Image (cartoon, rainbow, N blue to C red):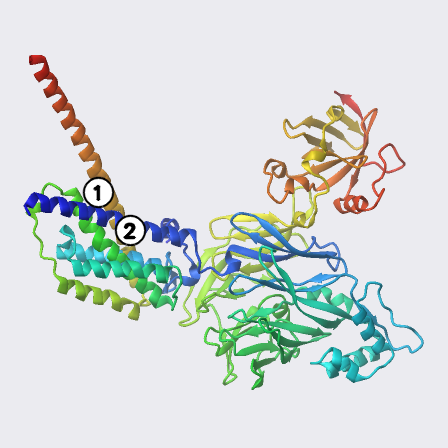
Amino acid sequence: MNTRKTNIISYRKAWIAFVASLSCLLIYVLACVMSPPSWSPDSSKIAILVTPTPRGYEPDKYAIFTYDIATGERVLLDEVKADGLLSTPVWSPDGAWIAYYRMEPNNPVEIPPVDSNSAPAVTQQTSTETKELASQFSSGETKEQLSEENKILPSLLFDLVEKSEQEEKKTDFNDMKLMLIRPDGSEKKTLHTMKWAGESSDKSEQMFIRPTWSKDCKKLFYARVLEDYSYVESIDIPTGKRYTHLLSSSGIPSVSPDGNWVASCLEDNQTLVTARVDGSMCKYIKLDMEFDDEYLFLFSGLFWSSDSMKVFIVGKESTLHAVDIASGQTEQYADSDANNTAYYTISSGGDKLYYLASSEALEEGLAKGTLSLRYMNLRDRHTGTVFVLPQLPELSGGDSGIFSISPNGKIVLLRTSIKDEHDITKSVLIFCDGKTKKTIETDRWLLKPLYSDSDLIFEEKLIGKWRGTDGEMFVAERGQGRTYKFTMIEEDQEHHSVANLVRLRDTMFMGVFFDESLLLEKDSSGSHLLPDIFIKVDQIEPKLLLQTMEYDEVARMQEKENGLPAQGPSEANYTFEGVRVQP
Amino acid sequence: MSVFTCIFSFLCSQDASRSFAIAGHLMPLCQRCSGLYAGMGISFLWLLSRNHKKDLPPRSIVYVNIVCLLAMPIFGFHLLDPGPAWRLWSGLVYGNAIVSLLLPAVFIICNEDIRSDYITNYSTTSFWIFFAFLNSIPLWFPAQSLWFYYAVLLLMLVGLLCVVFSVLAVIVFLIKAYVKLAIFKGSYYEHSKNQYNQL
């Protein structure tokens, strides 16, 4: 073979090597950037319990959604209205299922204070099974009958009823379902139905109680709530067998990564309870520190180290302590570079701890100073900053917000309510990843569209300048999509909004949007059909008569036959009553 | 180090839970990508120092590199994920394999005319010593020192620049070759035209 031929072969080989090596690198980089399979499910999506912006003590609507942080797509998984309850959802470690508790509306059976002459108060939609239980209680039937119904905890349940009778408390017994659902909502099943006992006012706390998955996704640990106590139980999902593990004052059990231990705490705020899942051992460890009971309830204030040897507990003032379950010794974990730390999250690999740090006090979950997302290597306790959070919006009075950190340590989520430019309080999710900040309003998620694009109408007569008793109003055509542009002038202040005109049955309404972008960016969830308020148009000429109505009010009226008020002048107090001053 | 974080954000998911922390500083790349770019940087420096950049490696070394490339899907797609050290290891050997093929290939492509003047003696012994060193890195990595952090960062940047430089060199070579060809074709055409006119 001559030199020239050798050179040509070598040259071809070089090109092959060049293309092959560059392709390998490109494939790797694309795979790493585009599909991060190591992410735990809730780092790319969140499963979230959405309730309306607080107007009272208890929410009147509960809905569970999954929300894709990157695409903004949301899927409604389950919802119940007033009297029912949904709990905070929990992803399985493999991302295939979401577990939560569900209580049907109008479910409870009230066990009234002892009065042998009065019949038990049973609500109309009570299940037969629950009615029987109620009648057993009221007629004083035997403990054996009760134990047949609730195999695991008859004595405690009975003691509880006796106690509530003595204290003249009203105890509700509710059928609580342990549910599983696919993240896309394609499959849903009830894993187990049990009875929870508690006062009706406990619902605002019960919505934070959530089940816990074992790492292999085969077992689900759940709580059976009985007033101030909870029985921590587990269910083997493939076989359906159930086991009882320990008594706790927190309804959120914590399962060790090796799946052998389950931990919780008692109401004295000093006793840690750990039990082997196989039932061979149960330890009560009295600690020389106090838990932060609120923290334990609202967040995951109890979690295991990756070697399943230590339990991390959040103490008073959000301090973090590790308890060696073999020796019972407690050790504080502190970040010397931060004055205050909170919202601890253990990484999906178990080797890092993420938390929010502030130079000033973290009060009621809201930082006063600059907040940063920091990490601690649990092996050598090295600490560092992942990123500094941007300036957060001014939050509205009562609701200070709850932070949450994704297990991959890349995203911080603040769930809170803020006041918009119209002084309306709205529930929002604020996602921060160190580079960008994304704010998502969730109130609209709970609304159902009352009309479709085909119901939209357009009235030329509405366009013009109108003068009313409280101010002036300009109505203009927005150009496309049969929508109007509104400018309301009150006391020299201009308020801009856009609106759709729609006929619901025989009544004309304007669906008013304070945020114009909702009509511009029509998303798959139909947000462009969910106005902030409805305005009933009773008459356009000779006088424009408008009456503001809440979304829920219109929805309720539309559900009923002939529920919507007839169109035309009435005795109602109009929000706007004006005459045309300019065509 | 926000500049590095920004640069590498286009190349890595930067999963903080799977990134090394050295002396309190979080690496701007995940453990596997840290291994990849550091591996490319080390291999680049080794090839430069050994004058091995001028010829493709012998067949035995090519086979080892192919095995290293094939190992990546197993670890990279998490079919096996035994921990940080293994992630770093898979990145290191993958990076080494890429540069071991890429750099000599680029040299041969860009020096097509003069290649026959170079006769290199690719030492397999030195490669095995170097390969053993690469494989030992996950056993002690990382050292908790600020100097070490900056050294690793620099090495990763060298690895990245090696690839960028290689691609640019080939692009420049192709442009040059194209221009040359166009000029040659042009003069040939003029020459043919003159000859035709003379006839």
Mark yes or no: residue A249 visible.
Answer: yes
- Please give left or right for residue B100 compared with residue A320 in the image: left
Nearer the observer: mark 2 or 1; the answer is 1
- Please give left or right for residue A524 compared with residue B155 in the image: right
Nearest to N terminus: mark 2 or mark 1 = 2
Residue A47 lies, in percent from the top left, at 59, 58
- Please give left or right for residue A99 compared with residue A39 in the image: right
Asked if marks 2 and 1 touch (Cβ < 8 Å), the reply is no
Mark yes or no: residue B91 visible.
Answer: no
Q: Are marks 2 and 1 on the same chain?
A: yes
Q: Nearer the viewer, residue A154 or A319?
A: A154
Residue A300 lies, in percent from the top left, at 57, 68
Residue A85 lies, in percent from the top left, at 71, 62
The amino acid pointed to by label 1 is: Ala
Residue beneath the point at 82% across and 63% down? A125
Give residue B122's quadrant in the image: bottom left
Residue beneath the point at 70% across and 73% down? A225
Q: Which mark is residue B160?
A: 2
Give residue A466's quadrant in the image: top right
Query: Mark 1 packing: few (<14 Cα in 10 Å), some, or many (20+)?
Result: some
Q: What's the distance in space between the residues labelled 2 and 1, CA to CA?
A: 14 Å
Judging by the rendered image, the residue that carries numbered circle 1 is B169
The amino acid pointed to by label 2 is: Leu
The number of callouts visible is 2
Residue A280 lies, in percent from the top left, at 56, 86
Instruction: Give the SS element for disc 2.
Output: helix
Q: Which mark is residue A34?
A: none
Give residue B121's quadrant in the image: bottom left
In which quadrant is the C terminus of chain B drawn?
A: top left
Determine the chain carrying the residue at label 2. Answer: B
Relative vertical location of residue A343 with respect to residue A544 in this rendering, above or below: below
